[in-house]
Image: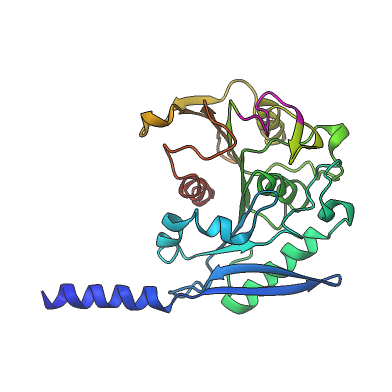
Amino acid sequence: MKRSFFAIALLFSLHAESQLMTDSVLIEGHYRSFMYNTPTVNVTGGNLLFIMHGSGGSATDMIKRTGKLEAIAGKEKLLIVYPNGYQHYWNECRKYSTAAANKEDINEAAFFEAMIRYFQKKYSINTANVFAAGFSGGGHMAYKLAATMPDQFKAVTAIVANMPDSASCDCRLAGKAKPILIINGTDDKTNPYEGGEMFVNNASYGVVRSTENTFHYWAALAGYKGEPEKKSLPDTDPSDQKTIEEYSYHAKGKPPVTLLKVVGGHHDYPNDIDVYLYAWDFFRSIK
């Protein structure tokens, strides 16, 4: 009994030491802010994961979604950071975005580079193990990080987001293969699964590729041909009327590229999986 009490007390003590912090870096005249929970263990040489909110959202929105991932962060030597977009939006690759971040051409690369330096200096994270995941507009930002900063990010996950088509893209794509996980719903009206014009707050953000086109763009960069491996994930919540099909390319010496097709999914999260735990499992499997 004494040992059990000591273990519980120690666990509570470790949890109590973690504090939600807000800080910022000055980028070209703008203070760009981010939030994170202080680590309860030594994360020297550990992993850094950025999780980005959707258009109009905030870092606090995302923190509410990652409780299960935060619970294992210490064991995984994982430091999770929640950046805030400029005036709640990102300057991603959508040429026709009406957000101030896009119109003012906010320097997102400098922001993420500064945050990586910040956490390398403060906690000695391994800069070779930096990842990113984003929801909606944050998913578009994740694509931008992989497509324009491939040497700084090991892998990314994009949730309910398709890449813009060539006419609607204002980024210079590096064309470098990277591990990518895409999670999209077939009934999404905001980010149409089959591609087409995308609207945010009733404003057109231009045309996005289909999910299949986005998936095969990254697969082709990695040198994959033929059909991906397919499997159905367990339907753990039949009440949500969604099922998930996983399509994946993976081969020795090539970056994995995976699509979770949420059949019946909208511009939201599926209930059958925790997408952030799934993303971390994808990231940690990369050698």
From the image, give the main secondary structure of the stretch colored magenta: loop
Q: Please say whether residue 197 is visible from this viewpoint.
A: yes
Q: Is residue 2 above or below residue 81?
A: below
Which residue is situated farthest in the left direction here? Answer: 1
Q: Is residue 195 magenta?
A: yes
Q: Residue at x 35, y 34 (%)?
A: 236
Q: Is residue 212 above or below residue 175?
A: above
Number of numbered labels in the structure image: 0
- The spot of residue 142 in percent (x, y) is 68, 48
Residue 18 is left or right of residue 28, and the answer is left
Residue 274 is left or right of residue 236, and the answer is right
Q: Residue at x 74, y 40 (%)?
A: 200
- The spot of residue 133 in percent (x, y) is 60, 50
Splitting the image into 4 quarters, where does residue 13 fall?
A: bottom left
- The spot of residue 148 in percent (x, y) is 78, 50
Residue range highlighted in magenta: 188-197
Q: Is residue 208 above or below residue 11?
A: above
Q: Please say whether residue 234 is visible from this viewpoint.
A: no
Q: Is residue 224 magenta?
A: no
Q: Is residue 18 above or below residue 240?
A: below
Nearest the eye: 240 or 250: 240
Query: Which image quarter is the N terminus in?
Result: bottom left
